[in-house]
Image (tube, rainbow, N blue to C red):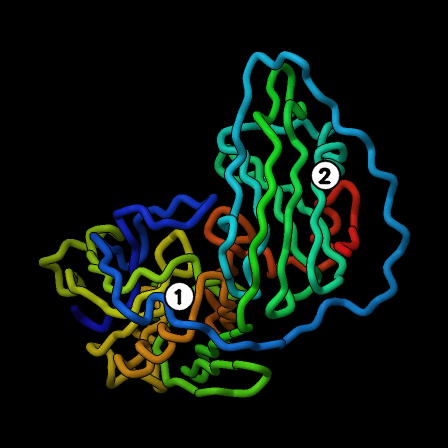
Amino acid sequence: MRRTTTSAVRIPVAVAALTLAATACGSEGTRALAPADHAQAVDVELKAPSATPVPPAQPVPPAEKLAAPRRTVAPQVAPLNGSTVGVGQPLALVFKAQKVDASLRAGIEGALKVTTSTPLTGAWHWAESQGDTLLHFRPEHYWPAHTKITLDARLSHVKLTDGTAVDRDRKLSFTTGDSMVNKVDLAAHTMTVVRNGDVARVIPVSGGEERFKTREGVKTVLAKDGRVIMDSRTIGIPRDSPDGYYDPYDWSMRETISGEYLHAAPDNAASFGKENVSHGCIGMSDANAKWLYGLSRVGDVIEVTGTTGKPMDHFGNGYGDWNLTWADWLAGSELGERPTR
């Protein structure tokens, strides 16, 4: 494969509430690598929850219910109940192929109770993407490490639109693990891995070249896929062309649905720390990729700067939630800031 380091998966990846599609460098398949797949990450408290005084919460309106809806829907919820995730993982409800009337959204927010073991203030945010209605919850800054988050969603028969309601109540809990934030500077061609507030390692990397610039902004690890077969045909490049490729890459962690990955790229070793030569992925040596993979978990943060590429999508291409300012996030909420204690 010629000077390439990007990817996309053709087989589905187990990420709740996200459908992963083939794109970017393209991947035909994945194979988990053990035992690092289940290794523990380490804590990074880069950003604490906001200490700004919280205004009184708005009154919570009652949710409108349908006693006998013509149709019920089951929202997808992420992350999974009982999971441990990185500090960048939003709490997400996805109403697939379903509109939600704007006049009903405040009542729906009011039926959702979020509690956390570390008191903080957060807010819900509504968005629409590819026919889906999304409802995400996050604090102003990344979640604190080692915090238990519980959602009590009292949505049974809560109306979404005429004749349609949610099927049942839901309750789930998840925990943030050790905090880990990867700061990628593609102008300097480095990734600074910050754990527990300290720099753990500065890794020479190579990102997307001029035609395939890596998206700029904050992303999260969507999946730890291990070995991924990259296929240039998924981005319209024939395998037998000078730029074509069909090769396996190890220690691959997906960061966008469109196919950007962090992964080992030994064929680009001469470019690490010097130039960007991939089709959008962030490549590094086998040794550094293996080390990073072993410390990482789904929901860890990747902050990309220095690309001059297009910004990370806010929704619909992974979790771009953190690219919205807090003011913009609150503008998409019906009830505004809500304390979680």
**Could you say which is closer to the camera, residue 309 or residue 165?**
165
Q: Is residue 336 left or right of residue 241?
A: right
On-image quarter of the C terminus: bottom right
- Callout 2 amino acid: Glu
Question: Residue 46, percent across and down?
Answer: 62, 76
Tell me the amino acid under the disc marked 1.
Lys
Q: Report which quarter residue 212 is drawn in.
A: bottom left
The dot on residue 109 is 2
**From the viewer's perspective, is residue 286 above or below residue 12?**
below
> From the viewer's perspective, is 60 left or right of 332?
right
Residue 164 in percent (x, y) is at 60, 19
Identify the secondary structure beneath mark 1. Answer: loop
Return the mark for residue 90: none
* Residue 202 falls left or right of residue 334: left
Q: Residue at x 31, y 52 (%)?
A: 23
| Depth order, front residue of 64/239 | 64
Q: Residues within 10 Å of mark 1 (few under 14, many from 20)?
A: many
Between disc 2 and disc 1, whose residue precedes? 2
Q: Is residue 210 visible?
A: no
Residue 257 position within the rendered picture, expressed as x and y whole percent measured from the top left: 40, 52
Residue 213: numbered disc: 1
Q: Residue at x 36, y 64 (%)?
A: 253
Between residue 252 and residue 116, name the one nearer to us. Answer: 116
Task: Name above or below for residue 30 compared with residue 201.
Answer: above
The residue that appears at 64% across and 58% down in the rendered structure is 324
Gap in angstroms between the C-alphas marked 2 and 1: 38 Å
User: Can the viewer see residue 147 in this picture?
Assistant: yes
